[in-house]
Each structure stands twice: as structure tokens, then as C-alpha cells.
Image: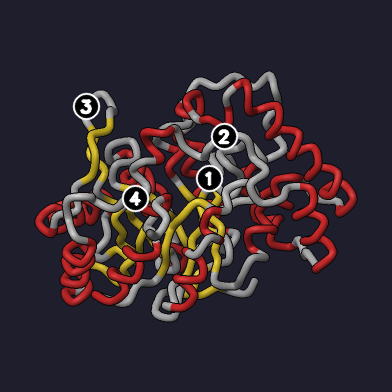
Amino acid sequence: MNERTLGTTGPKVFPLGLGCMGMSDLYGPADRKESIATIHAAVEAGVTLLDTGDFYGVGHNELLIREALSTLPPSRRDNVTLSVKFGALRDPKGGWHGYDARPAAVHNFVAYSLQRLGVQHIDIYRPARLDPFVPIEDTVGAIADLVSSGVVRHIGLSELGEESIRRAAAEHPVSDLQIEYSLISRGIEDGILETCRSLGIGITAYGVLSRGLISGHWTPSTVVNDFRAISPRFQRENVAHNLSLVDALRNIADRKGVTVAQLAIAWVAAQGTDIVPLVGARTRERLAEAVGALAVVLDADDLAEIESAVPKGAAAGDRYARPLLSELDSEKRPT
């Protein structure tokens, strides 16, 4: 399987990454043994990029990854690229209290992540969101100090808008921007993707299945007991419309002999070799389906048919609830 390079300065990785958040947080209870088995299966399948955040499960996810990696053969473990987000503030009840990306906080957060992960360095380190009270240059400059000392290999960004991306890249080379990108979340196409490409910055695309909504496994009777209960696209007035888009995709997937999820993942992968889709598989079954998407070839006719079935802006509802959407620098349009 051909590797993809994250930007002009970043690492080479398998063309699909594993997002590990759901194994610890926000998607309801997860099976620890199955989570570890899924990470093992991902690495055995060739997946090299594992994405986490120090606030996922308030440290639980980093400890889970450490446990999974510690039981792999060194030859496999050494090929793993760890991407870590930092900055989100939590409380003992799991509540959220903004972001802290001050230089002192950067150095503090990385020290804890190194300990929890049981590693000497982090491959890609990135602020989870823009701290509105700290210039992005200060945050990136602090990570650059960690690069110089060998604690961090590459600097990544997450959910930043065009101006912030340019300012960050002027401070230090950036490997990739992590941002939501799917058939029904295409805001990146309104300038951000072009900006990243002009600066040699790759894309790690999360939410490629829109939190399961366009996976082909979601039904109108699916019960929501997690954070998706407040997500606009899963609300009763929107979900029926959004699932009609999935039905349109299913018609195309059936003709190609693939699943809806595989078609949706393949579409993101087909948007450029500088894009690496992240899948949030929590089981080996879902992981196998996602990896199978890499064998799906979409030609110009396929892409046109998919575009017709799910045109840009077709989804009902925003990708986040309003309070969360307001925290995304990527949603602020240049003036």
C-alpha cells in the first residue's frame, strides 16, 4: 500500500490513520480488550498513524495506547507514528473548560503525555484548538523548542482558519492540519485546503463518516446516548434528511460492490494524496471495513455520481452545536 507524506516536512504514514478517541471518551462505553485488539489489528494491517489527545478520557486514551503498544513486537511498535493533541481543559466529572495553549502549558502537557504514553518523543504534537488568549506564534514557538530538544518530531495544527495557519507556518514548518472532512462536512474546501497546499501542509481528515451518520450502519431507530445527542445533524428534524443522503450513497456503493462506509472513506482519500483519512474504529470488524476502503478505486465518473448524490452543503444541520462551533477558528471566514 502506497504511503502518504504529511506535508513537505512531515512523516510518511499508511494512507489511513486510526483515531483512538472513541475507545476512551464521548461515544459511550468501550470494551478495553477489544480496543487493544483493534489497535493491534490496525498495526498488523499496516496502519502507522495513531491519533489521540491528552484529554481523551482525561489521560485514559494515552494509557490505553501505551498498553497496546507495549505488547507489540518492537519491529511493529517502532513503526507507529503518534499524533497527540493538547490544550483542552477538563474537570473530574468530564466537563470542558476551554483551552490553554500558553508556552508553559505546552511544556507541562507534553511532560505528562510522554509519561502516560511511555515514549521518549511524540511524533506529531498539536494544539487541539486555537487558544483565543494566546497568539498562535507563541504556542507554535513553544512546540518548536520541543522539536529542537528532540521531545517532539513534527508540529501539527487542528481546526485552524487560513490566517492562523499562515501565521503558524511562518513560525515553524507544519506537517499537517487535522480538520473534519467528509462528504457532508466540506468547509475545508472554502480556502483552507488551498492554503495548506500552498504552504506544503498535509491534511489528516477526521470525521470522515460524520460520527457514524454516513457509515451505512446508522438507522432512524438508533438510540443516541452520547455526545451526538446534542449534535445538530442527529436531531430528529435533520437525521431523516441526512439518512436519505446515505440511501443515495448506498445505491452507488451497491453497484460497486462495496459498503457505504468504504465509499465515503474512499471519497475523502480520493481528494488528494496529501490527505490521510482518520477512522474512529472501535472494533476489529469496523477497522477491517475501513481498511478495505483503500482498495476502492473511484474514477471521474464515480466521483461525479457521488457529487450528484451528495452535493456540497447537502447535509441538514451544522457539524457541531453552536457553542462548540464558535470555538473553531476554522469556521471563521476571512474578512
Give the alpha-carbon distance from disc 1 to disc 4, as whole Å: 18 Å
Give the quadrant of residue 152. Answer: bottom left
Give the quadrant of residue 61. Answer: top left
Nearer the N terminus, badge 1 or badge 3? 3
Between 120 and 51, the one nearer to me in the picture: 51
Give the alpha-carbon distance from disc 4 to disc 3, as whole Å: 22 Å
Left or right of 26 in this view: 253: right
Q: Position of residue 281 (x, y in %)?
A: 56, 44
> In this figure, which residue is indicated by the disc labeled 4?
66
From this view, report whether residue 281 is shown above or below residue 292: above
Q: Which one is closest to the eye, mark 2 or mark 1?
A: 2
Q: Secondary structure at mark 2?
A: loop
From this view, report whether residue 142 is shown above or below residue 104: below
Count of labels in the image: 4
What numbered label is drawn on residue 92?
A: 3
Q: Which one is closest to the eye, mark 4 or mark 2?
A: 2
- Name the kind of residue labelled 4 in the image: Arg
Q: Which one is closest to the eye, mark 1 or mark 4?
A: 1
Residue, x 74% and y 39% (percent of image)?
245
- Note whether residue 74 is visible: no
- Name the kind of residue labelled 3 in the image: Pro
Q: Which one is closest to the eye, mark 3 or mark 2?
A: 2
Left or right of 93 in this view: 216: right
What numbered label is drawn on residue 280?
A: 1
Q: Secondary structure at mark 4?
A: helix
